[in-house]
Amino acid sequence: MRRNQIKRLDIGFCSLCGRAAFWSENAKKLQDDAIICGECVRKLRVMYPFPLDPKDIKHDPLKNLTTGQARDAMGKVTEFIEDFRERYGYRNAVFIVNKIEKEGGGLFKSPLYCLYGRVLYGGFSINEDVTVKHGQSLYQCRLKDVYLDVPLTDGYALREKDHAEGGYPAILQIQERNLDIQVRDLIVK
Ligand SMILES: [Zn+2]
C-alpha cells in the first residue's frame, strides 16, 4: 500500500515527451534541472551508456545534458543505432563481455557462466538463442538468464530479471559444458 502511494507521487512532467515522470521509474534530472521520464531515459541510454563501474555512477553522462541536447539526441537515436548495426555486421543486438564468473558444474552438470558487461544496442531476453563471437570463431548458445544490472551506489544495484537493452550494464548467463569466452568477446543476436 505504502509503496503504491510513493510510486504515485510524480515529480513533474517529462521535458521531452510531456508524460508524468516518477523517480521510482528511473526519471532523471538533467544539467539544467529539467526532468526526463524513465521511458525517455531508456531510449537515450544507447547513446549515453550507464557507467559499468559503481565508482563512476556519479558521472552518468545523461545527467550532463541540457534539455536542448537531450531533445537533439532523441532525434538521432535511430540513426545512432543504425550506425552501430552497420559497424557490427547488421546484428540485431550486441553485448560486450567485461568480466566472467564461472559457478558450479560437476561431472554431470554444466557450469553456469555469468557474463558481466554492457548491451551496446538492441535487447537480450531470457531463453533466447545467441551467437558467441570469440575471436574469429562463432558458436551458438542459449541464454539461461538475463539481468539488467544497474549500479546505484557502491555495493547496491538495481537488478531486473529477464531482459536488458542498449546502453545498460547487464549479466547474461549461459550454462554450457565448456564455454570458450574471454573479456572483450561479443554476444550477438
Ligand atoms: Zn519522456
Image (cartoon, grey):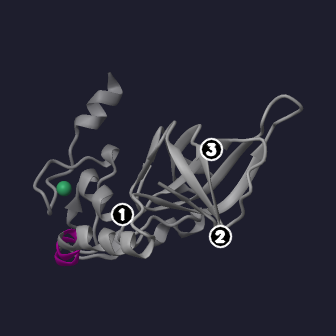
**Circle on res. 14:** none
Tell me which segment is drawn in magenta: 68-74
> Does residue 114 appear to the left or right of 26 in the view shown?
right
Q: Amino acid at mark 3?
A: Gln
Q: Amino acid at mark 1?
A: Arg
Where is 60 relative to 148, above or below? Answer: below
Q: Secondary structure at mark 1?
A: loop
What's the residue at 30%, 64% (across, down)? 44
What's the residue at 28%, 52% (across, down)? 38
Question: Dot 3: few (<14), some (14–19), or many (≥20) neighbours within 10 Å?
Answer: many
Q: Does residue 28 show up magenta in the picture?
A: no
Q: Main secondary structure of the magenta part?
A: helix
Query: In the depicted view, which residue is nearer to us: 9 or 167?
Result: 167
What residue did someone put label 2 on? 136
What's the residue at 60%, 49% (across, down)? 140
> Does residue 159 appear to the left or right of 32 in the view shown?
right
- Residue 76, percent across and down? 22, 73
Q: Nearer the viewer, mark 2 or mark 1?
A: 2
Where is 90 relative to 1, above or below? Answer: below
What residue did someone put label 3 on? 173
**Circle on res. 45:** 1
Where is 159 relative to 52, above or below? Answer: above
- Residue 111, percent across and down? 77, 39
| Quarter of the rendered image showing ligand 1 | bottom left
Specify the farthest residue to the right. 107
For the residues marked 1 and 3, what is the alpha-carbon distance in whole angstroms?
22 Å
- Residue 3, percent across and down? 35, 29
What's the residue at 69%, 66% (across, down)? 183
- Residue 105, percent across and down? 82, 36
Query: Which comes sooner in the sequence, label 2 or label 1?
Result: 1
